[in-house]
Amino acid sequence: MTLRRFGPGLVLAAVVVGIGLGARHGPGPAAGAVLVGAVGVTAALLGLGRHASDRRRVVAFVALCVGAGASGAAAMARALDGRVHHPLVAAAAGRTDVVVDATLVTDPTATRFAARGLARVTRARIHDVAAGGTTRRVVTDRIVVVDASGPAAPRLGVLGAGDRVRLRGYLRPLDPYEDWARWRHAVAGLEARALVAVGPPASPLMRLANALRSRVLAGTVGVPEPQRALLAGFLLGDTTDLPEAVVLDFRASGLSHLVAVSGQNVAFVLALAGPALRRGPRGVRLVVGLGVLVVFVTMTRAEPSVLRAAAMAACAMVGVAVGRPAAGLRSLALAVSVLLVVDPFLLHSVGFRLSCAASAGIAALAPAIALRVPGPRPVAEALGVTLAAQAAVAPLLVQGFGGVPLIAPVANLVVAPAAGPLTVLGLVGGAVGGIVGGPLAAAATLPAYLGASWVLLVARVAARLPLTVGAGPLLVGAGVVATTSVMRVARRRAHRGPIPRPHPRLPAEPEVRARP
């Protein structure tokens, strides 16, 4: 029972420690760590059977922790190695002219004279002047930061993730302020002077996801700004068209999580696909459900928060299918462990850390807080979720943004009645509007427009209240809460007094009869 309850958390801790050791070791193939990880995980799978003895389970679990830690170290060392030792890195150091065939990884952000995005290079022709003007052809699979200017900028700015491009320009080393790109596996920057050719996505999955994404966004074209941009953030996590003032309002009011695709969006998408997920054998339902998750993650461009939510949903689906359901903290720990082994750089993503912390806080603290909040149950539960999430992410907000907005629980409580329906109405209205068009599209998206207007109003009003605190007041408040909790527990135990122990039963005295 103890391993079942705390085991996933210990495995996650082993993965995180392993990633730290891999970062300390530095770039390298890490063949030894790969071997140890494979042996440890295999031994654990062989030992963790249903009918295994307790001793065998403990040994298998220790092997699993060792294998998980070694896997994390190997993943980190190999990821760092791929970012350092590559021909594109050497070419970037010399600012070499190149012609690359690449696939866009993100939707480019465009201004009037420039466009920027991430692209995965598949082939490169490197013109090395230092080597006598020779041209080398390199087949690769590395990500670069594309900065397009001149005539290439407007053409690149209208493309989307998955589109194939041929670019001419020169490679450069990444600048110090581009750490965000380094932790997304970028190895160099590409200053693109010309966009030579453009092609559609080669992946059928990407074509399907882009078609669905375009259909949903097309249904909201008639919605005025900035409500339309907010709907794109609510539905697909696309915040590129949100005005800077709105972004600052959401950050100051503690509502930024609403435009980050997370568990709520995944739950609504699975609910919409519910009729298909309730038919057929269990294996077929599992495959269909996982397919829906993969398509939705691709539609939302695999942002860290949606990766966490989809991985948790996948763990829950697989657990139900094999008869060993996992929920709450266990599902979160398993999902995060798998994601970090696949991509250890996620540990450096602020969005990923915030999403994981909020999920952990909701699972661990929300029920207890809701029980202690007076009033109607729906209000108490909503406030419990908000307070639990804010308490969990507070240290990260202080570290990354300098403070925590105290107005966030109130703002989230006021927005909560509109946030859930807004996502559903936006998805349905966007899909219907994208299909029928015309006045019917405006009617289908009207409820979502009203909900978005309410959310914008709440964010604007809450952002005007200067209720942000830093690390000092938070530490004092945490100390007061902890001290009060300890004193309350001690007072309850003192009031109850010692538990009386039962006295041994004494033998009955013999009956004395009077003599006649």
Image (cartoon, helix red, strand yellow):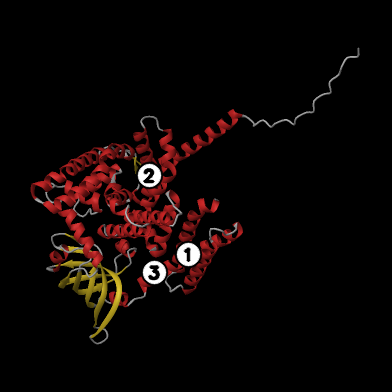
Secondary structure, mark 2, is helix
Q: Is residue 176 above or below residue 392?
A: below
Q: Which quadrant holds residue 196?
A: bottom left
- Check the image and name the residue furthest to the left: 438
Q: Residue at x 27, y 38 (%)?
A: 417
- Check the image and name the residue furthest to the right: 516
The answer to which of marks 2 and 1 sits earlier in the sequence is 1
Q: Residue at x 25, y 78 (%)?
A: 124
Secondary structure, mark 1, is helix
Task: Give the percent coordinates (x, y) of residue 67.
Answer: 50, 65
Gap between marks 2 and 1 measured at Cα: 30 Å
Q: Amino acid at mark 1?
A: Leu
| Residue 77 visible in rendering | yes
Please tell me the numbered disc located at residue 80: 3
Task: Give the percent coordinates (x, y) of residue 479.
Answer: 47, 39
Q: Nearer the viewer, residue 338 or 294?
A: 294
Task: Give the percent coordinates (x, y) of residue 308.
Answer: 36, 55
The residue that label 1 is drawn on is: 21
The residue that label 2 is drawn on is: 389
Q: Amino acid at mark 3?
A: Leu
Asked if the residue under mark 1 is in contact with the one under mark 3, i.e. CB atoms within 8 Å, the reply is no
The answer to which of marks 2 and 3 sits earlier in the sequence is 3
Please tell me the numbered disc located at residue 304: none
Gap between marks 2 and 3 measured at Cα: 32 Å
The answer to which of marks 3 and 1 sits earlier in the sequence is 1
Q: Nearer the viewer, residue 384 or 315?
A: 315
Taking 448 as reference, is 24 left or right? right
